[in-house]
Image: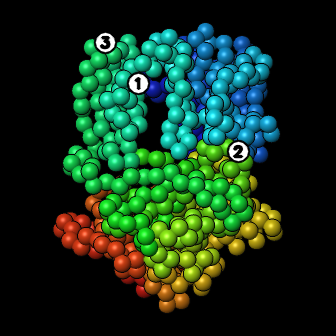
Amino acid sequence: MNNRDPKWHDLYKLEISSGKLTQIRENKDRITNWIFDWDEQPRIAMRTPEDGSTEFLAASENGKFNKIYAVSALESVYPYAFTKNNDQLYIETNKGVENNFIKLVLLDPANGKTTDVEKDPMNRVDFRYAVFSDLSRELIYTSYTDEKERLYFRDKAFEADYNLLKSKFTGTEIRVNSLTKDERKWLFSVSGDTKVTTVYFFDRDSKKIIEQYTPRPKLKTYEAYLSPMEPIKYKSSDGMEIPAYLTLPKNVEPKKLPLLVFPHGGPWGRSYWGFNSYAQLFANRGFAVLDPNFRGSTGYGKKFLDGGNLEWGKLMQDDITWGVKHLVEQGIVDPKRVTIMGGSYGGYATLAGLAFTPDVYAAGVDIVGPSNLFTLLNTIPPYWEAARKVFELRMGSEKTEEGKKLLKEASPLFSAAKIKAPLLIIQGANDPRVKKDESDQIVSALRDLNRTVQYILADDEGHGFDKPVNNMAMIAASEKFLAQYAGTRYQEDMPADVANRLKEMTVDIKTVKAVK
């Protein structure tokens, strides 16, 4: 809990029956995580020094912690589980210049030595995660996410049951969500690009499969109308290969289509193959939808991730722009009907696209996207203190003149005059990550420049919308807005509560004041 110091979490024991809290350790050492062994003993603490690196500290008999392992601020490390006898720890890491891809290794807490366990057999992507048995304390399987997910099994009996389920649900991805204590019964989910997620029960002994529920029961009856999501690749401005996903409207010839580019947030994350509600909605309306994994995205190795360092609004944006060019050159997309929409970093990429490549886009929808990288960095939440140095290294530091220059050039706010395309901005008033000021600044600037800008502000939302009525109102406004400039279909009617909420959230831009 970080009630003592908002930046750092102290370690407590919680008695569930009474709510009694007992502090185990006060955190004045920049500790970010605790690793417990199979006997529930805290064995290793993870620490982030001011240089942004990550250290593993092993507990000694005298109660002190000794540093046994460390990675730099731009390297990755994550713990999983101890071996069955608690003498070594499974971790994932890409430490060292020789390791481009994250791999699974064993770490010896006694001396800090590591032993390789596994890396991607195809040498294409990072190690993603490992699953262990609470019964045997052994590794069951590992996962890698390429164009789609690949699993590699250590437990052959588990693999046989998993493959049985795969044979029943072809063309899908299956995720084992939870197991009974004896691991003989599972809850597993089935999903795919045109398959709405559904959860099932599975008895490993009887092989009985029983459907449980789906979060989208009404949509399930329309699966035949959903559009496939296809993995694609294209070259960026400097020749780097960019992986992406393309969803095309169903039963429509893929020629001269309107395009919606939908960059993911983060930016240190990635888009995945599977059911995507935004892609499906806008493909239904007639758009081709492009989900690009631009450089700086995770999962494709250290070089690809680091390729985005100090490239906000530059090569990272090129990776998106060249995806548009690729689809235009193929004849799939009409260059006059290209739009862009995204949330968080995807919102930033929307603003950057309209500001830095104003001739590419006909319209944009920015959802909780930062417009000014100076104010973004100055409002990093206290609980993100451990990551502050990484932001400086990957975005630029305002502590140096060169860093200030980079941040200013990459901030769409300072290029607002270049924006020509109409823009819809969507913001949560209580956003702790991308403050309301980020949207107020760009709305105010565009209004004063007599540009077409609309503003939706939810007084009861934060970083993205969670309440269904707010989400529906936001989507209704977005599809109508984009349809004006891309010539696509949209649903004009909506339930009364959604229409009323949209009216409440729509801001008169004349009233917006930017904080200086």
Please state which of residues 389 and 180 is positioned toward the viewer in this rendering. 180
Q: CA distance from mark 1 to mark 2?
A: 32 Å
448 or 474: which is nearer to us?
474
Q: Secondary structure at mark 3?
A: loop
In the image: residue 398, left or right of residue 482: right
Q: Residue at x 55, y 50 (%)?
A: 270
Residue 207, located in which quarter of the rendered image? top left
Question: Would residue 138 appear left or right of 460 to someone viewing this image?
Answer: right
Residue extending farthest to the left is 496
Residue 27 in view: no
**Separation (CA) of disc 2 from disc 3:** 43 Å
The residue shown at (43%, 52%) is: 229
Instruction: Say which residue appears at 41% left-offset and 32% top-offset.
Output: 175
Please identify, in this view, whether the residue under mark 1 or under mark 2 is nearer the observer.
1
Distance between the alpha carbons at the discs numbered 1 and 3 = 15 Å
The quadrant in which residue 52 appears is top right
| Residue 361 visible to the viewer | yes
For residue 163, the mark is: 1
Evaluate if marks 1 and 3 touch, with contact meaning CB atoms under 8 Å apart. no
Vertical placement of 172 versus 403: above or below?
A: above
Is 190 rendered above or below residue 251?
above
Q: Amino acid at mark 3?
A: Asp
Question: How many other residues sit within 10 Å of disc 2, few (<14), some (14-19) or many (≥20)?
Answer: many
- The x and y percentages for residue 249 are 36, 62
Image quarter where the C terminus lies is bottom right
Q: Nearer the viewer, residue 410 or 263?
A: 263
Mark 2 vs 3, N-terminal side: 3
Q: Percent from the top left, x then y, of residue 463? A: 46, 57
Q: Nearer the viewer, mark 1 or mark 3?
A: 1
Q: Which residue is mark 3?
A: 205
Residue marked by disc 2? 302
